[in-house]
Amino acid sequence: MAIRRREVLLGGLALAQLAAPLPLRGQTSGVSTRAAVVVGVNKTGDLPVLRAAASGAKSVASWLSAEGFEVKLIDDDDGRVVTADSIKRAVTELVNRGTLTQLLIYFSGHGVAFGTSEFWLLTGAPDDLAEAVSVTECIDQANRSAIPNVVIICDACRSIPDFDTTLLHGTVLFPRGSFVPGVQSPDVDRFFGTRQGAPAYELKIAADDYAGVYTSTLLDAFRSPRAGMVTKVRDVDVISNRALKTFLLEEVPRRLKAANSKVIQYPDSKIESPESVYIGRATAQPRPTPTPIPTPTPGPTTGNITVSDIANHQFSLTRVGPLASLRDLNVQALDRASADSELRRVQRELLDTKKADSFDTETGLFVVGAGVRAVWVAGDQGGDIVDAGDGRERPAMISIPGAYPQPVTTALMFEDGSGTVVAALPGFIGSLTVRNGQVTSVAYAPSPRGSRRSEYAGENARLEELRALAAASSKFGVFRIEGDKQARTDAGGRLANQIRVLKSVDPTLGLYAAYAYADANLPDQVRSVQSYMRGDLGADLFDVALLADKLTGQRIEGLRNSVVPFCPMLTQGWQLLRVREVTLAENVQRARDSLRPGLWTTFGPPGVEFIGRAIQAAR
């Protein structure tokens, strides 16, 4: 069952040291500027009871206390209830001090991820929809905090749940603060026990003795480091967050393979801090690097090559270059893994999708994979369904009247009653791909009849390749810019240079890039994309304006021509409305409850009805 955080592995693993308790040494004297909130939840609703979440949290709390952190431990040992409010109060109290240089948040328990949403489930979940932590929103708020280094560690599943998640919004742990764009720029380091869409595991070491493989491996990085992992910072031997990322990625699967396990687990980390930033000291002399255990693994990874490696490798072959530092991997092995990967399959699928080149209109929408029953366009006129399509061989074609000289909010209802909201852009054809009831791709290209066609003539092939790579990487959650501030700025600059065509920005790539910049905490680049696109299109795309903080604190009422459409086009944007304090019109907000998981905004039939009402009420 996908919801289980850890399917328990029995026998065969000679790693008794995993369960060895860490000594609890006294905290350093004086007021600490390093603090941690450590959470462990074994029992969540009617889900399978975990064996090592609470004990793992206690081990982490003990270790952090020894490293000089002020630790707030919250667990459900002895039948205690872990609530979202108790965690939020702990985080808020620490953040509001304004004196922290490093804040660490650790969670061990049940987790779920679907589309671009991710949650940690607490004692009262999933029945109580508020008793969960909204991870995506917490990361966004951490990026906007005034704490120089925020570390988020998660030992939980990131797999798709088998219960209804449409109303699961969760709780944001960070308080709303006085964020000043361009002034605060924290480094947010994320350590996730497994890749997106995959489970995490517990190990049975002895009778009634269990350990989370990820947490145990993390602790061992400091008490039994490998050669080359130790860095001196102010004459202290430490394991930097960067070295910890590499160790976890190599050691977690190695331990599972050494146990002859039939399952595998690849940690997923994103580090923004420089080499000098660390959580803990090396408490032992480095040991020799173990001999790797080569075992090919099916799916989006091969051996120890992850989907992140594949995406970064693919970007390195473009003019953009790598978006993160390339790991020391065999190039031939990377090429083989890339060729057989799900990422490349999706990329090729997007490139092979039927194009709208034959659609002779100035502005329009072209839908592959679903027939169109209805179209609503903001304003007095509607769109003209030139061909409703059959959902199979014949695409649907919608022409937007020339009376709309600026971008306009447009809603489509597909043949099954589901639908979406997009921006119709003058001089562009927006191509939508629908599969299994979800919009899987949106791409804008100059209309054959439009004046922009000549500008893009020599760039179409390059842009389509880059667009497909960005879309596939976004689908798997690996379109991200990594490294310290300078490395991220440099990579962001290369990406910016490649999404431009003369003085314009490719609209689709502009959307993807804005999300990548926001995730990498590069606000200047987000604002640059917003400025370019607004100057070129004559309006802001909602998602880009949201990420550039142009909508913060506002209520989006009516059909504002300056911001289109009237809600996010990418599903991830819905997860940021609350923390950016953006309020949508009532009917649009009600449509959110029928959002389907996926990359691009897709509503079930009830949501489409609300969207239709929102457009008609605003005319």
Image (cartoon, rainbow, N blue to C red):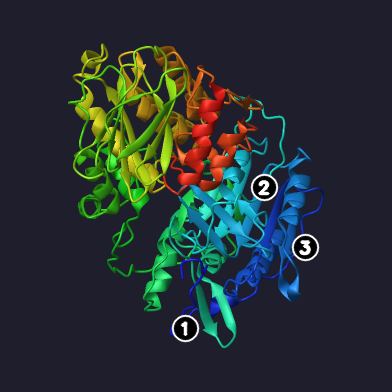
> How would you rate the neighbour count of disc 1 (Cα within 10 Å): few for under 14, some for 14-19, many for 20 or more?
some
Residue 194 rendering spot, x and y as whole percentages: 46, 60
Q: Secondary structure at mark 1?
A: loop
Tell me whether circle 2 and circle 1 mark residues in contact (CB < 8 Å). Answer: no
Q: Nearer the viewer, residue 301 or 547?
A: 547
Hey, what amino acid is under mark 3? Gly
- Tag 3 or tag 2, which sits nearer the N-term? 3
Frontmost of labels 3 and 1 is: 1
Residue 575 rendering spot, x and y as whole percentages: 55, 42
Residue carrying label 2:
103
Instruction: Using the numbered discs, state the Cα–Cα distance from disc 3 to disc 1 in whole angstroms.
Output: 36 Å
Q: Secondary structure at mark 2?
A: strand
Frontmost of labels 2 and 1 is: 1
Residue carrying label 3:
26
Hey, what amino acid is under mark 1? Leu
Residue carrying label 1:
10
Instruction: Using the numbered discs, state the Cα–Cα distance from disc 2 to disc 3 in whole angstroms.
Output: 19 Å
Question: Can the viewer see residue 536 in this picture?
Answer: yes
Image quarter of residue 532: top left
Instruction: Using the numbered discs, state the Cα–Cα distance from disc 2 to disc 1 in whole angstroms.
Output: 35 Å
In the image, residue 426 sits, relative to residue 345, either above or below, namely above
